[in-house]
Amino acid sequence: MIDYRIKTIEKFSPKIGELASMLEHTRAVTLEEIRELSQEELDYLVDEGSNSIGSLLLHIASIEFVHQVISFENRDINELELKQWKTALELGQGARQTIKKNSVDYFIEEMSKVREKTITQFKGLTDDWLCKEKEWDDGVPYNNYYLWFHVFEDEINHRGQIRTIKRMLKNNK
């Protein structure tokens, strides 16, 4: 059952606990949306320029991974990490060609592995860490709170796309 409350989770500092609560709620709703999908539904393309549900799910995991590296390790992803995640990060033609023929369990497992690291890392951080000011290479300021807001914002956005694809699938049956 999905918990529809945002609350502080005791094992975290107050704001990080609320952030973890929001991330977990967002993920629970996403998993509810996709749990029963077949491989064919996960691979379905609305048109030749669209992304599949499976690609969107790996993209969600890739965005979280990149934000882990940036916020927890204070660096950008390296060549090996880029090689692993590039297709899911960029989506498009590469994803249409390679992210297919996987079960829903595969996507859930990939998303869960990344999330597990996030939650583990959050346990050792303070609320001050969330507001730590940083700057992109172009001089634009940001903080860790924004990075993690963007992780669930991105997931919610792509979940909307997933719901649209599911409606289209239903209408095409």
Image (cartoon, helix red, strand yellow):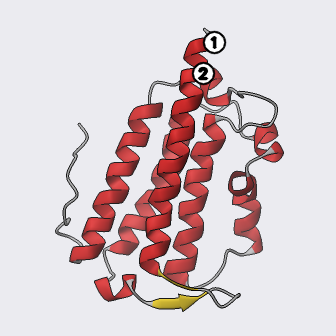
Left or right, 37 with respect to 50, comes to: left
Numbered disc 2: secondary structure: helix
Q: Is residue 130 above or below residue 84?
A: below
- At a point 64% along the width and 21% down the height, the residue shown is 40
Q: Nearer the viewer, residue 22 or 125?
A: 22
Dot 2 alpha-carbon crowd within 10 angstroms: few under 14, some 14 to 19, many 20 or more: some
Contact (Cβ within 8 Å) of mark 2 with mark 1: yes
Tell me the residue that label 1 is attached to. 172
Please, is residue 50 above or below residue 4 in the view? Answer: above
Q: Which mark, by number, is residue 168?
A: 2
Which residue occupies 44% across, 30% down?
35
What amino acid type is highlighted by mark number 2? Met
- The x, y position of residue 51, in whole percent, is 70, 39
> Residue at the top extreme?
173
Q: Position of residue 23 (x, y in %)?
A: 37, 58
Quarter of the rendering containing residue 1: top left
Question: Percent x, y for residue 112?
Answer: 45, 51
Q: Quadrant of residue 97 in the image?
A: top right
Callout 1 secondary element: helix
Q: CA distance from mark 2 to mark 1?
A: 6 Å
Residue 52 placement: quadrant = top right
Residue under the image location 22 percent in, 45 percent down: 3
Give x and y (percent) for residue 114: 50, 58
- Looking at the image, residue 75 sits to the left or right of residue 18; the answer is right
Is 171 on the left or on the right of 156, as rendered? Answer: right
